[in-house]
Image (tube, rainbow, N blue to C red):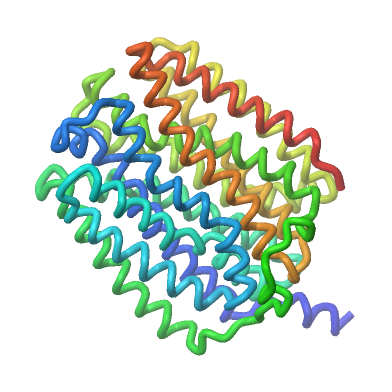
Amino acid sequence: MEQTSKKQKVTSHAYTTLALIFIAYIICFIDRSAMNIALAYVGKDFGLSPAALGGVASAFFFSYSLMQVPGGWLVDRFGSKKMIVFSLAMWSLFTVLTGFAWSVASLLVIRVLFGIGEGGYPTASLKQIAEEFPTDAKSQATTVAISSNYVGSALAPVIIAPIIATLGWRNAFHIMGLIGLVYVLIYWLKERPLTTNVTKSASRKFNWKLVDKKIWSFFFIIFGLNTITKGLDTWMPTYLLTARHINLTGIAWLVPLPSIAAGLGAASAGFIMVRFFKGKERWLISATAALTMLFMYGMYSSRSLAAIIIFEVLAYLVKSISFATTFGYVAQIIGAKTYGSSVGVVNFGGQVAGFVAPLIIGAIVSATASYSMAFLFLVAAAGLALVSSLTVRK
């Protein structure tokens, strides 16, 4: 019994690692969300239509999604810490460069390179947590790390909107990029040496046959859930500005509300999963996916702004529980040998959604001159997550 207790003990260094990854994720999502908040101003500067703005928003996710599978392989090949340092440095550099874009073409190229640079971070961070935490603590540590995504999204408008209002959208990217470059140094100083467990088999070419078949159910769950997240994250600020005519100061407090709810949901997902759904994790994913679909339909059918915001907050709360539980469950059932590659495949589903959702919503809004059908599209995405969750097997 004493030996088991020792094995399951969480070290102080593991908590330090979790804190470093948590903060880095916050910076990551503030940097990423900055474009969503600045989208209307970027469109004004470059004279872009809603469909073209959807292309600008999707440029990052195009390359970011393509990097998920090779990024997972690179994490298994070179180790989690080295990939975290590389990703941090690259996305911070391209955040700075976004503010220097001189044309639509240059902006698209920079955003594509931004996505490549950041692409390895999610898998690297989750793998480092899996390496640092014992088996019985992996799920909760993973869901806590994922909750940082929503903290970053909630803080983004509070931080970015005032900077844009006072200094312009270009300076907002310059400031956040410089903060990221400073944080690279902090992470490197705390985590030296950068040696971690490397999977020897990863030195060979990535083999899709080695991917556990269960992963594809998770792939489509995350695809459906992230379609909602990326669709709303990208277009809600523009919707509030253009359709509801709320100024930048007004959306600074409205936009964070769903992300705050999502952060609470993701942070509590690990506790709910372990305390009430141990051995029944897939039913927690299905139940919360069903509630997400219900609340998204409420958002679609609502006409008042208050009702839309309330249903959006509720949808984000349950959606984040489903999202975090999915990754927590993957952390439990996937072995260390191909963990990076497997998580890369799951995250690939989410980032493909990040690429297609802004484009589809932009096209719908351009074609219908209304956001109602765009909300209905997101209801269907929640339905896909629900159906996919029912295919998960032990």
Q: Is residue 267 above or below residue 131?
A: above
Residue at 62 percent of width and 42 percent of height: 222
Residue 200 pos. (x, y %): 71, 80
Left or right: residue 105 versus residue 170 is right
Q: State the count of labels.
A: 0
Q: Residue at 13% x, 37% y: name it.
A: 45
The residue shown at (51%, 42%) is: 262
Where is residue 360? Give x, y as percent.
45, 27
Q: Quadrant of residue 142?
A: bottom right
Q: Where is residue 384 in the image (x, y as percent from the top left)?
A: 66, 29
Of residue 182 and residue 143, the one placed in the foreground of this image is 182
Name the side, left or right, on which 67 lies relative to 109: right
Residue 246, compared with residue 174, is above or below; it is above
What residue occupies the far left of the structure in this picture?
A: 166
Does residue 320 appear anywhere in the picture? yes
The residue that appears at 27% across and 33% down in the rendered structure is: 251
Instruction: Please tell me which residue lies in front, 160 or 218.
Output: 218
Q: Furthest-bottom residue in view?
A: 193
Q: Is residue 63 left or right of residue 393?
A: left
Quadrant for the N terminus in the image: bottom right
Q: Position of residue 366 (x, y in %)?
A: 33, 18
31, above or below 391, in the image: below
Residue 163 visible, this orientation: no
Q: Is residue 50 above or below residue 118?
A: above
